[in-house]
Amino acid sequence: MLLLLMSALLATACLASGFTVGGGRWTPHGDALGGTPADQASRFRVFWQAWHVVEGQFYATDPLDPQQMTYGAIAGLLAALGDPYAGFSNPPAHRLENDSFSGDFGGIGASLAIDNGIVALSTVHPLSPAEAAGLRSGDRLLAVDGIALQTTSLDELALAIRGSPGSTVRLDVQRQGQPLTFGVVRATVELPSVWWQALASGLGYIRIERFSGRTPAEVGLALNELQTAGAKALLLDLRDNAGGLAATASGVLAQLLDGGIAYREMSRDGQEQRIAIPFGVVRASTLPLAVLVNHGTASAAEIVAAAVQDHGRGPLVGEHTYGKGSVQILHTLSDGSSIRITTTRWLTPSGSPIEGVGLLPDIVTAPDQDAVAQGCLYLAQSAGTRLDCTGQLTPNEETGKVLV
């Protein structure tokens, strides 16, 4: 078995996210214009009236925080759009978004978990900075850089521990009742998005947790490993995959399909663009394929599932998918915060909508049925090959943990 995934989904990753990163960047319109544009002055007069009333009259025991008030105003602007996928992220949350999308970050190479309110290093990964510094799996985390834990939010703790490669973070831990302090020099830590396993009698299993910049290469590695191990058929598991970088879906499809349309994009002016599956870049697998889906399959995961289904490459097995067919551009603002806004919607290769509709599986399973077994049985019958469909997957031990 080859197990690659070393982290849980970040809590800050939106459900059913489909992002284009790099399509939007902050531009200094406000600075260039010296404030509110003249043609918008009448609209913003009421905003500034409200702002000054709050500044002058709000009863507060602590000083007002103009930064948080500004962030609240931006969040309100996006909420007024009525789009559940539009939103605002403050600088720390945006850092986590970027880590998830890029697939690596500066960290120590350990996984955090919570058990009965206690935060511990559940796993110290081999050859990691954490291991080199002397940390061990099971160490209870007490403080980061001399600041005692004020939260058990794994995302907040991840932000505190992560940092620039080459910098040092000090961790205070408790081991068998003894307090210890370690200085750990951060290095680049990979944040994998795929894990896989060779099951008995030739069934290869690949699970994509989310779509990041690493995903196409990781799927390629998984396919090579499984085919070398003698896989006769493939199960691609997209259950509870909320999406990620939409553009990486085409790179995954290139390894499953010999060309064709990956999906269609529809802009707000009604223009349609057909996004092609890269052809000839890699050799697509010809092994019989089935794709596992459920109500948590969304966005980029639905793009891959729809293309496999539309091109007749294999059936979808499981439950009706989420129905997220829109792309959000992520704009990084000047202070490191970000906004995401919907710019386009996508359709399946055949032109069917996904937004609010989702995908219907070819083989429907009840929530309490074993979709892996059902997919295996289909492959055994259709491929005319002997597969052992009684084997069990090894649980992913990193589920519910956060890599730091």
Image: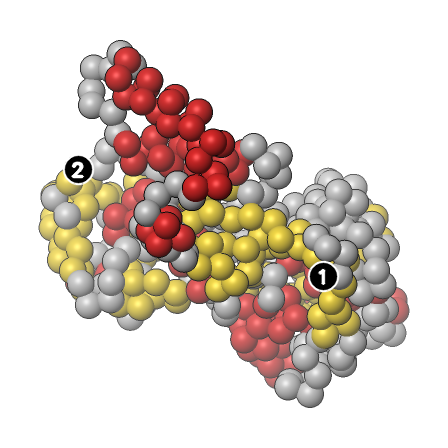
Is residue 294 depicted above or below 59 in this figure? below
Badge 1 is on which residue? 265
Q: Quadrant of residue 68?
A: top left
| Three-letter code for the amino acid on which mark 2 is drawn | Ala
Q: Which mark is residue 94?
A: none
> Residue 154 placed where, x, y %?
36, 43
In the image, taking residue 126 as reference, residue 226 lies left or right, namely right
Q: Tell me the SS state at disc 1.
A: strand
> Residue 225 placed where, x, y %?
58, 79
Which residue is more in the foreground, 284 or 249?
249
Please tell me which residue is depicted at 17% across the width and 50% down the height of the picture: 171
Please tell me which residue is depicted at 75% across the width and 61% down the height of the picture: 271
Q: Residue furthest front?
A: 38
Q: How many other residues sit within 10 Å of disc 2, few (<14), some (14-19) or many (≥20)?
A: few
Q: Tell me the SS state at disc 2.
A: strand
Q: Which mark is residue 148?
A: 2
> How far is mark 2 from mark 1, CA to CA?
49 Å
In the image, taking residue 177 as reference, residue 218 lies left or right, namely right
Viewer-nearest of discs 2 and 1: 1
Q: How many other residues sit within 10 Å of disc 1, few (<14), some (14-19) or many (≥20)?
A: many
- Quarter of the image with the N terminus in it: bottom right
Is residue 277 depicted above or below 90 in this figure? below
Please tell me which residue is depicted at 51% across the width and 49% down the height of the picture: 340
Which residue is more in the foreground, 16 or 287?
16
